[in-house]
Image (tube, coloured by chain):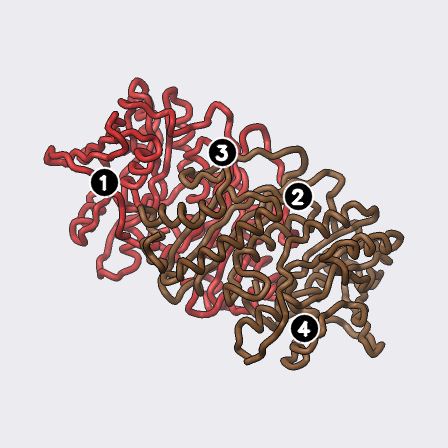
Chain colours: A red, B brown
């Protein structure tokens, strides 16, 4: 491309937009199904339940240690399918681009997006681009939709959860939130924290192979605490969380202590929370720990008969209600 | 809802976000498949080819005569499926909302979105909301994905177009572009132009029932001229357009003359351009004109053996190349 920066003409439906789509999007995301000239594309799907999901991404900054908005978008959508027991197959992608965005930066983002898609074995089959005025869209927003397939036996529902079921997390929490925070440089902190931004498919596949799996969810916005509240409210059961058992990297813990954040509310982008029949908690934990991404997996709590509340046993042995998130500790982390 | 305006907390994944989703989105878009608590939802599809499309909407202002960004989003996605010969079945929706947007305005938009979805018989089955800082997102951006089904015999391709085929448009062009322009009040013009924003499904169904239909497309961003260029470039054939035959409302023509716009490049949001075997052009035109939306349908040109160029016969009888759109006459019309 001759231009170095995005202009409004790149969004007008004419020649410049066609060039942008061809040189950046199709070049890095191309596959036989992605027809940039089509209004809609035909896709084939194999046997199973068709699963749909959608997500928008407005993370700031656009690039951070461990990923960027492009890889985050793919992993976010892939993970929303994966935790329902599905295998992601197709993605659609829409980009709202700010006038003035360096095209080299856009290309880095789309390259990472393409790599993440290949890594999760999903294909981007449809897309759309819009360009908005300087000052809007903070560089780039991405939205996407995911289509997956789920084997009937992998249908997981919150209704299946029973008191006594064990709660697992696949790895340390809060890495993504803190990595993005440090990348903002607002606090003048330098850190070694990388986002955990990754596909959770290896983790969900390992869990699906264990009997007694009840439910899975990825703790993104609002973190582990929010997922536990969602599970508790939707199932009508209580959850009891053992704070000392929750894995948190020392660097994440330090930043949290310095700035007054609670890692329980910080976003992860490559972790899974799973609820498992207590009889199968040990093999489920072993299955996670056998994976590179799951070496720090831990049993962190259990479901209880207490009605729809989340109790936290603190590291000092006290017990308190875990509050639902109200104020946003870290806006714009996904 | 107690709040009157959107705050960042409405996007944080916690209690405020759940309230917003329940009170505005689920209340107006609810259907048995829309599970606001799920990461991904299972959907059933009948027989046929599965068609996917995606589109983002950044129109300014958010509300204009004849529609708003909500109805526009549904119609835009529905129409992208309809022109491929598909019947839209499911939509996903992601909303990027600016902090400070009046909740009453958001609700008007989502009500219109729900009405447009019911009118086109599609269901919103998955959604996502993000909230961004004041000054970003111009109030609201919407993105969505559409899933449709296409009967095998309705597969339309550009390859099918032959020299001599006739080109039809289903109604007057430029209404949407001019309606949005006048709604901006930048030029101090008051006008009576309403957007043509509507589902084109009745039109595409009527055309699919006529033998000899080669191809359809909706002339949105870049207008009729851009669609003709796309058809010409993708098919490798020439197109000849008779300017005098192109329907343009007098009010649209007047504004164009005053401000120096060419209606051929202005967006429509409820029109179809169709290419039809010359032998069936008359019944195709009659099928369109039998519909309320198609009363001003017209035969406007034909395919030629000239290689990939669009020729315009002007109202004075001269002939010139119709240039491809480069500068954006009206940014942010969809």
Q: Are marks 2 and 3 in contact (CB under 8 Å)?
A: no
Identify the residue under disc 1. A248
Please give the name of the residue rendered at 74% of the width and 59% of the height, measured from the top-left corner: B170
Q: Nearer the viewer, mark 1 or mark 4?
A: 4
Are labels 1 and 4 on one chain? no
Q: Nearer the viewer, mark 4 or mark 3?
A: 4
**Residue A55 in view (yes/no):** no
Quadrant where the C terminus of chain B sits is bottom right
Identify the residue under disc 2. B87
What subunit carries mark 1? A
Sequence-earlier tag: 1 or 3 = 3
Relative to A284, is B164 above or below? below
Are labels 4 and 3 on one chain? no
* Label 1 – label 3 distance at C-alpha: 29 Å
Q: Are marks 2 and 1 in contact (CB under 8 Å)?
A: no
- Characterize the local packing of mark 3: few (<14), some (14-19) or many (20 or more) Cα atoms within 10 angstroms: many
Secondary structure beneath disc 2?
strand
Relative to B246, is A210 above or below? above
Identify the residue under disc 4. B252
Sequence-earlier tag: 4 or 2 = 2
What subunit carries mark 3? A
Identify the residue under disc 3. A87
* Label 4 – label 2 distance at C-alpha: 31 Å
Q: Are marks 1 and 3 in contact (CB under 8 Å)?
A: no
Task: Measuring from the top left, give residue A283's x and y in whole percent.
Answer: 32, 21
């Amino acid at each position: 491309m001759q231009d170095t920066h995005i202009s409004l003409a790149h969004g007008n439906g004419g020649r410049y937009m066609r060039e942008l789509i061809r040189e950046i999007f199709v070049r890095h995301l191309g596959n036989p199904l992605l027809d940039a000239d089509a209004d809609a594309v035909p896709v084939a799907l194999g046997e199973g339940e068709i699963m749909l999901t959608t997500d928008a991404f407005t993370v700031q900054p656009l690039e951070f240690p461990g990923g960027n908005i492009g890889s985050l978008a793919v992993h976010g959508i892939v993970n929303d399918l994966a935790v329902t027991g599905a295998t992601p197959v197709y993605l659609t992608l829409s980009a709202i681009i700010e006038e003035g965005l360096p095209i080299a930066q856009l290309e880095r983002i789309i390259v990472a997006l393409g790599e993440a898609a290949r890594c999760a074995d999903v294909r981007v089959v449809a897309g759309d681009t819009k360009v908005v005025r300087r000052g809007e869209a903070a560089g780039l927003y991405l939205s996407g939709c995911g289509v997956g397939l789920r084997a009937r036996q992998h249908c997981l529902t919150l209704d299946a959860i029973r008191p006594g079921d064990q709660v697992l997390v696949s790895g340390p929490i809060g890495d993504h939130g803190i990595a993005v925070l440090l990348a903002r440089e607002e606090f003048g902190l330098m850190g070694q924290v990388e986002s955990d931004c990754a596909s959770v498919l290896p983790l969900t596949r390992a869990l699906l192979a264990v009997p007694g799996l009840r439910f899975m969810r990825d703790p993104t916005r609002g973190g582990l605490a929010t997922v536990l509240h969602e599970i508790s409210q939707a199932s009508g059961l209580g959850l009891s969380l053992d704070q000392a058992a929750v894995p948190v990297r020392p660097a994440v813990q330090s930043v949290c202590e310095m700035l007054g954040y609670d890692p329980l509310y910080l976003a992860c982008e490559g972790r899974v929370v799973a609820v498992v029949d207590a009889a199968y908690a040990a093999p489920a934990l072993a299955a996670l720990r056998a994976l590179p991404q799951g070496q720090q997996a831990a049993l962190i709590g259990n479901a209880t008969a207490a009605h729809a509340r989340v109790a936290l046993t603190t590291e000092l042995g006290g017990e308190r209600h875990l509050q639902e998130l109200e104020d946003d500790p870290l806006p714009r982390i996904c």
